[in-house]
Image (cartoon, coloured by chain):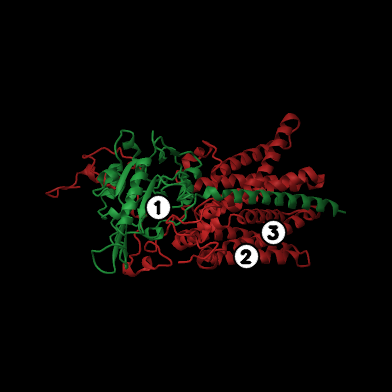
Amino acid sequence: MSRKGFFTDSTTCIGCKACEVACKQWNQLPDDGFHFTGMSYDQTGDLGCSTWRHVAFVERPVPLPGHTTGVGDFSWLMVSDVCKHCQRAGCLEACPTGAIVRTEFDTVYVQPDVCNGCGYCVTACPFGVIDRRPDDGRAWKCTLCYDRLGDGMTPACAKACPTESIVYGDLDVLHERAENRVRELHEQGIISAYLYGKDAANQPGTGGLNAFFLLVDKPEVYNLPPDPVVPTMKAREAWSAVALGALGMAAVAVGAVLLGRRGSP
Amino acid sequence: MSSSGEEEPSFLDKLQQRSDGRNVNPALGTLLGEGAQQRVKDLDGANPARTVSSSIPSRSEVASADAPSYHGLAAIKQPVWIATVPAYLFVGGVAGAASLLGLVIDVLGEEELDPLARRCRQLGTVGDMVSAGLLIADLGRPERFLNMLRVFRPTSPMSIGSWVLALSGGLNTVGLVLGRSRGVLGVVGKISGYSAALLGMPLAGYTAVLLNNTAVPLWQATRRTLPPFFMASATASAGSLLSLFPHSPREEGVLRPYRLAGKTAELAMGYAVEHDARRAPEVARPLDEGVSGALWKASRACSVAGLVVDVLPGRQRWKQVAADLLTTVGAVTARFAVFHGGKASARDPQATFKPQRRGHGAAEVVPAHAVASDGKPFSFPLPVVR
């Protein structure tokens, strides 16, 4: 099986939320409640246990470079966020039960029948994607429509996207398409366009994302970290510190017992 | 999903709606989706309403050029763990340190110290048992706790810790039960007890790695100092708890240097943890502000007081008890401070974003990596020239 993934182009996103709806319907995810957030057109807020696609809406007081139409000092930024299915996935490397696995499509999948809800993946994800549902007790996230992929179908969100902002396919094909798109945008004068997390060279902390993005502003604006790192990459220092600490603990115990012996009458 | 005519939902529909928050009409489809197994009892509990953002989005913090964020929302998820986890961080540490002291007394100490060694092993065993209970209570699906031993994953401190705790608890129990038998059983008991004691060191230290190996800014930033701090704190509190039990002057000869060394190391390492966190001011903020800040300051004060009262001249019993209680309270409070501080730093998007911009993200461990994911150079080690 070839490596599959999403390419999400924020410049063609119109904020229709068809991806959110299609995801909810296909996966039969529970209701998020009808809450008003006051955050532009975004009533979902973030990805979570029952939200596996989330459209972010940013109203900027600056125009997009190269834009000639529209109202003065204003530009819309919209992007459909999703689990990134990282090459070095924090959730997968943290999962103590083996519930989180890498599939034959190179995607990251949580097996609900194995997960015991320890919640470690929730803290290990550098993007804040996976979440534990309190009343269910298990961790949930985007499966990249594992059930559809097996039948050779396109994931529900990509299928529903009316502007091809979300494209699903082989990663090699997607990379080429994305690079062409960036070149095209640069020629149009939108020089701020760049690819977020395309490969390990761009994002060594995650080894590249299977679901990568085309953005036109800083990642922080879209609630994406500027230099994410899978926590495991930094664990060596912590384990070395444990080794040192163990030496110290042993030394204190041995020293105390020897002192107690010698100091005895 | 009623169409035209607003029909009254049937009894079955009502039942379905009460048990399931999906609003899927059972007549229209079977629940076979990947998310259909999600148990739904409390819709508002899983998705609490947010405070409505009333600022004008285009003029809010989102737009600020130097510190952008998405409507001020958290960049990563807050840890979902409950209070049993910080409680375990303390209990597990005490169990590990006590088991280790038991082993050292057994090997190096004289016969008169045997009661103390036995108390150490008892404390270790009880601590292991309580630890397992505290951890299982935190699981979302406690009945599946045995899945922890389904695989061994060296990249996951949680997996390593589960094995260490399971082995340490099991071996300690065997050691305690068979410790006084004669013949082969006695040898088995001794070996078990000793192995459990050696596992006590990783047991006291891995709990810090468990926190360090996360995306939570405060926990990740303190990865060089938190493990020794937890281990020193474990030594101090094990010494204090053992001193609270009635013990002979000979035993006090061992416990006093052990306790004092632990308390001193705990104080020093606590300072080091704070220093480590302060490399990024956004990361250290929870140690100064809010509930976690108050807890941290209280824990520092208790630890100092515990050491000072202990070294004051005079050997009255009440003085000793006060010193030991102060140290224990300080150690417990420190675990809760670090735990809640981590939660607070996860809630703050700038604690995630700003240090990464300054080169504290992947750039710390990937040397040749010089630009952020948007192609902008890090301001570290040289300031960005625009």
Give the secondary structure at mark 3. helix
Left or right: B49 as drawn, with respect to B350: left
Residue at image mark 1: A196
Q: Can residue A112 be seen in the rendering of this structure?
A: yes
Q: Quadrant of residue B300?
A: bottom right
The residue at the point 33 percent across, 36 percent down is A149
* Tag 1: amino acid: Tyr
Decide: few, some or many residues near mark 2? Use Cα within 10 Å; few <14, some 14-19, many ≥20: many
Q: Quadrant of residue B65?
A: bottom left
| Nearer to me, B377 or A20 | B377
Decide: few, some or many residues near mark 1? Use Cα within 10 Å; few <14, some 14-19, many ≥20: many
Residue at image mark 3: B265
Relative to B65, does residue B74 appear above or below in the rendering? above
* Tag 2: amino acid: Arg
The residue at the point 70 percent across, 64 percent down is B307
Q: CA distance from mark 3 to mark 1?
A: 44 Å
- Chain drawn green, letter? A
Chain letter for mark 1: A
For marks 3 and 2, give the one nearer the viewer.
3
* Tag 3: amino acid: Ala
Residue at image mark 2: B300
Give whichever of discs 3 and 2 has the lower sequence position.
3
Give the secondary structure at mark 2. helix
